Structure formats: structure tokens, C-alpha cells
Image (cartoon, rainbow, N blue to C red):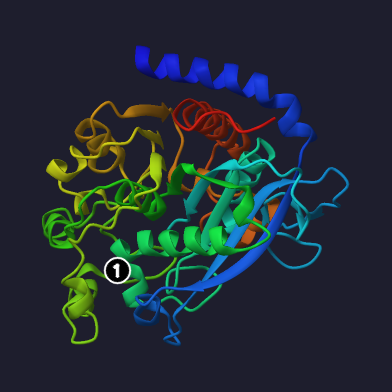
Amino acid sequence: MARIAKLLGLALAVTALAATAAHAATVGERHLETTNPTAALRDAEHKAGVRVTVWYPAAADAKEERIDLGPPGKPMFIVGQVAQSAAFVDARPRPVILFSHGFGGTARMMAWFGAPLARAGYVVAAVDHPGNNGLDKMTAAGAIMSWTRAGDLKVALAAAKADPAIGPHMDMTKVGVAGFSAGGFTSLVAAGAKVDMNRFLAFCKTHPTDGVCMPQKEFLLSMDDAQKAMASPALAPEAAHAGDDHRILEVKAAFAIAPAIVQGLPPEGLAKIKVPVAIFLGDADPVAPPDTNGLVAAKAIPHAQLITLPGVKHYDFLSTCTPAGQAAVRICKDELPQDPTHKAALDAALAFFGKTLGKPPA
């Protein structure tokens, strides 16, 4: 508890110091596309493309527009506002944060997290994971090939660095990674965790009602069907490489929000992670239960920081649901207001990355 209190205290201090710049800054948004060979296995149309969304501190005169999600005039989720293709605020290189969304999510669904980090001075690169995002058709391969997600972040980092408008502003000596749910799993893999999906499948055979083992609301796939798909001739050759080293060498710190699929990460592999890690979760999460996910990771990873929010559930970490979203979207049913949860996560992330990567230029 002392460790948690110390971290949250640091979060408030860092946030207070950054508040003026963060509120005054404008956020730019640019879109890139790159390729990952495994994407063709996961994508419903067998395309190798990976979409990348980059948020960054933009010039003060750039005009922001709202990017809330849903029908025009009746959004389901409040996301925020950004300035499309705006110029950077200055020429100084800045720390970089890679971001991985949750199962069936999108980069923009998590802009509540990424855009404020950009306001605080970071360059944030998020992806839409092929075959496992809310914009494209979901696939069994996209659902089960979780280990390939770190590769999506790796190619996104390379694409952003190679982009003439973005690359010169990226400090490649200060790269962090963050993610939510399956994206929390991704962030741990990118930080060096070893993957063993057979271990995960074995866990689900003995714990079929665990939240991560149940068919997910975003894509109803049973564990039996997942195992059959992974053993299929199309996917088995890639599945044989699940246990390879998928770390992103540039990553210096990892912030995992409500990490899921942690039973696919052997404790002995988690114990070998060498970069600082923070685990941020809600103690009432039924989808990625802390006892079998986040708390397991926090216990196994050396010196991991653990931040737990009482009463917070899994989908509280999505963008804020509107009344229309609460009426129409199944995942907009949690009881607590989401904004305080978002603020706590952002405060902790700013403190963590400020300490591990160094504060970005004001």
C-alpha cells in the first residue's frame, strides 16, 4: 500500500507540474499505414496492412475538431478532439509511447488516454490490430494470435520514425509502451515477457468460467474453437513461433492497464523483464479478473508497481459512454462514472513515464 500511495502521490505532483502545458497544448493527429507479414493471417481479407494513428503536441494555431465515436450528432463514446495533420509545436525530439488497444477495440477508442499524453508532450503511436479491431471484420486468427500484436507495435514504431513529418520529433532513446486488456498483454510482451499460449489454453480448460476464457462480447469464440484454429494448417506454422522473443528493443518502460491473457505469460518469463513495469487495474474487473491476470503479473515482475482502483470494472477503461451509448452498446453498462477512472490512469501514467523516460519538453 505504501508503494501505491507513493506512486499516486508522485502522479499528482507530476500532473500538477504539467497541468498548465497539458491544458494549453493542442493535439495533432496523423494516420499512417505499414505492413506486418502476420497481419495477412489475421485480417479477414488477408491484407498485410496495419493502420497507425499518431498523436503529438501540435502548433498552437492548429484547429482541433471532435473525434467522438458513433453516428453524426449522436455519438456513442466521447473521445476528445484533435487537429488533423497539424504541424508539430516545435522541432525538439520527444519521448515516444506505443499503445495497444483491447480485444476488438481501436486506436481511437483509447484516445482518451493517448491524446492527453500528447498534450503533455509525448508522441503517441497506436495501432488497429488486424483481425481484432472494431473497424474491420473480426477473425478467429485475430482473436487468438495475441503474440503477434507486439509485432504490430514494432512496425508502427518503424513507420513513424521513417515518416518525414513525425520521425524527426521522436526520441528513440526514450520509448515506452502502454496497452489496455489484450493490449496490456501486448505491452508486457513488448517489454520482454515470454508467450506460451498452450499454457493459456490449459488454464482455460481447468478454469472455463474465468473472464478471459469466456467468449468475449466483441467476438464470440469458444476456447475449443480457438484451439482448433491455432492447430489448423493455416495458423499452425505461425503458432509454432508464439514462444519466440517478441520484445521491442527500444522499449524502456511498460504501463499495462487491466492486462488480460496473463496466463499465457509464464511467471518465469515475467520474472526476466528488465524494464520498469506498472500494472493499473480495477479490483471489480470480471473480464480480466485481477487474481488471475494483473495481480499475477505484478507479483512475478521484479519491482512492478501496482495501482488498484476500488469498484472499477473492465470497460470503465474505454472512452466515456454517452447516454446513447449506454442505451445501445452492451459494454456501456458499468455503474461508476468513467471520468475519475480515466483521470487516475492518466495521472499514474504521466508519473510513471515521467520517472522512467524523463519529462517531455514543456
114 on left or right of 237: right
**Quadrant position of the N terminus in the picture:** top left
**Occupied quadrant, residue 298:** top left
Q: Nearer the viewer, residue 73 or 147?
A: 147
Mark 1 falls on what kind of element? loop
Up-down: is 355 above or below 212? above
Up-down: is 140 above or below 215? below
**Where residue 66 sits in the image (x, y, percent)?**
78, 55
Q: How many marks?
A: 1
Residue ID at (68%, 61%)? 30
Q: In the image, what residue type sits under mark 1? A: Met
Residue 105 visible from this viewpoint: no
Residue 26 visible from this viewpoint: yes
**Where residue 24 sits in the image (x, y, percent)?**
80, 34
Residue ID at (62%, 24%)? 15
**Occupied quadrant, residue 32:** bottom right
Q: Nearer the viewer, residue 57 or 286?
A: 57
**Where residue 136 sits in the image (x, y, percent)?**
52, 76
Residue ID at (51%, 17%)? 10
**Quadrant position of the C terminus in the picture:** top right
Q: Nearer the viewer, residue 106 or 308?
A: 106
Q: Residues within 10 Å of mark 1 (few under 14, many from 20)?
A: many
72 on left or right of 182: right
Q: Return the residue at label 1.
A: 145
Up-down: is 55 above or below 234? above
